[in-house]
Amino acid sequence: MDHDAGDLVDMIVAQWRLERPDLDPSPIAVVGRISRASRALDVRLKEVYATFGLGEGDFDLLVTVRRNGPPYRLTPTQLGEQMMVTSGAVTKRVDRLAEVGLVRRVPAEDGRSWPVELTAEGVALTQEAMAAHVANEDRILAALSPAEREQLAALLRTLLISFES
């Protein structure tokens, strides 16, 4: 692995150093790379979701319900909180996934809400899609050693926590 090879962001930073020597363009080296990496990740992740006939939001809803364990059922409010999306977005996703038989709404004991539950088909598809997703993420990160992955995860955690506080 050649960690010293330059990239487009290095060129941009160098150009700004020449054009505006009064500014420190070093934040571009981090933010620019995170931004570019985010766009590249989206493309690679969506390719795998599509092989299962899923969009990003569909995948997110299915794995959110699945990772909460049996009986693979969450209320729309819980889904919105855990996926960090609006109730309208949850409803659209649930409707779409119910239409293809991957989830169903079940009456709650209190009669007020209709929790969303994975069907047997939903559980099976989620098992397969999640395995493919993790393998894809492993391929995406292949350029980094296990220690580098841990270091990057820790740095990104610190950054994200700063946004949330």
Image (tube, helix red, strand yellow):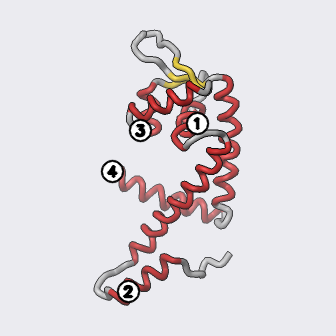
Helix, strand or loop for disc 2 = helix
Mark closest to the chain's N terminus, 3 or 2: 2
Q: Nearer the viewer, mark 2 or mark 4?
A: 2
Disc 2 marks a residue whose amino acid type is Arg
> Whole-Å distance between the Cαs marked 1 and 3?
15 Å
Q: Residue at x 63, y 51 (%)?
A: 47
Q: Measuring from the top left, give residue 109's x and y in whole percent.
A: 47, 10
Disc 4 marks a residue whose amino acid type is Ser
Q: Measuring from the top left, give residue 56's x and y in whole percent.
A: 54, 44
Helix, strand or loop for disc 1 = helix
Circle number at residue 165: 4
Disc 3 marks a residue whose amino acid type is Val
Quadrant housing residue 43: bottom right
> Whole-Å distance between the Cαs marked 2 and 4?
32 Å
Task: Choose between 57 and 123: the one closer to the eye.
Answer: 57
Mark closest to the chain's N terminus, 2 or 1: 2
Q: Measuring from the top left, give residue 25's x and y in whole percent.
A: 37, 78
Circle 2 residue:
17
Mark 2 nearby-residue class (10 Å; few <14, some 14–19, many ≥20): some
Q: Are marks 2 and 4 in contact (CB under 8 Å)?
A: no
Mark 1 nearby-residue class (10 Å; few <14, some 14–19, many ≥20): many
Mark 3 nearby-residue class (10 Å; few <14, some 14–19, many ≥20): few
Mark 4 nearby-residue class (10 Å; few <14, some 14–19, many ≥20): few
> Whole-Å distance between the Cαs marked 3 and 2?
40 Å
Mark closest to the chain's N terminus, 1 or 3: 1
* Up/down of 136 relative to 106, above or below: below
> Whole-Å distance between the Cαs marked 2 and 1?
45 Å
Q: Are marks 1 and 4 in contact (CB under 8 Å)?
A: no
Circle 3 residue:
85
Circle 1 residue:
63
* Up/down of 130 relative to 77, above or below: below
